[in-house]
Image: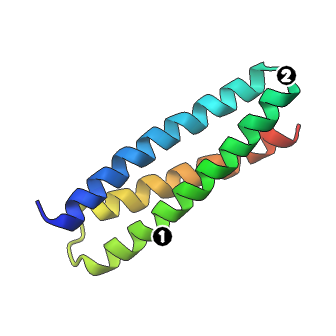
Amino acid sequence: MKESQSLTNNLLMEVDFLSNRLRNIRQSFKTTNNKALKERLFSENKNIFKRVNEIYKIAELLNKKNNEKINFSNLLVEITERTLNENKFERNLFFL
């Protein structure tokens, strides 16, 4: 396994974890009435979104350096795009 593939696999696992955490945050936000918890969830959501965005930029760089049409970096780009779009779609949840 090449070094970039190892990096890509680690980033794929991280995005998977962060994506699940974002879903859990949204669910908790919907069900709680505690103002302090909502503020913490909002802050955590923002920080995770920033990290996923950073990973997306890394994925694009890795993908540009790879000539193959089907590869892990392409998958990483797709998964991070989906996570970012899902989070943007439900962003208004935090402003209810």
* Spatial separation of the CA atoms under disc 1 and disc 2: 35 Å
Q: How many labels does the image show?
A: 2
* Marking on residue 28: none
* Residue lying at 31% horizontally and 63% vertically, measured from the top left: 73
Q: In this view, does 2 lie above or below 40?
A: below
Q: In this view, does 60 lie above or below 90?
A: below
User: Foreground mark, 1 or 2?
Assistant: 2
* Residue lying at 48% horizontally and 70% vertically, measured from the top left: 57
Residue 73 shown left or right of residue 82 in the figure: left
Name the image quarter holding the N terminus: bottom left
Q: What residue type is labelled 2?
A: Asn
Element under disc 2: loop
* Residue lying at 58% horizontally and 54% vertically, measured from the top left: 84
* Residue lying at 28% horizontally and 60% vertically, measured from the top left: 7
Element under disc 1: helix
User: Taking the image as drawn, is residue 41 in sight?
Assistant: yes
Mark 1 or mark 2: name the one nearer the start of the chain: 2
Q: Residues within 10 Å of mark 1 (few under 14, many from 20)?
A: some
Q: Where is residue 12 in the image (x, y as percent from the top left)?
A: 35, 50
Which residue was labeled with disc 1? 57
Q: In which quarter of the image is residue 77?
A: bottom left
* Marking on residue 34: 2
Name the image quarter holding the C terminus: top right
Q: In this view, does 31 lie above or below 76?
A: above
Q: Which amino acid does label 1 sit on?
A: Lys
Q: Which residue lies furthest to the left in this view?
A: 1
Mark 1 and mark 2 in contact? Answer it, CB < 8 Å: no
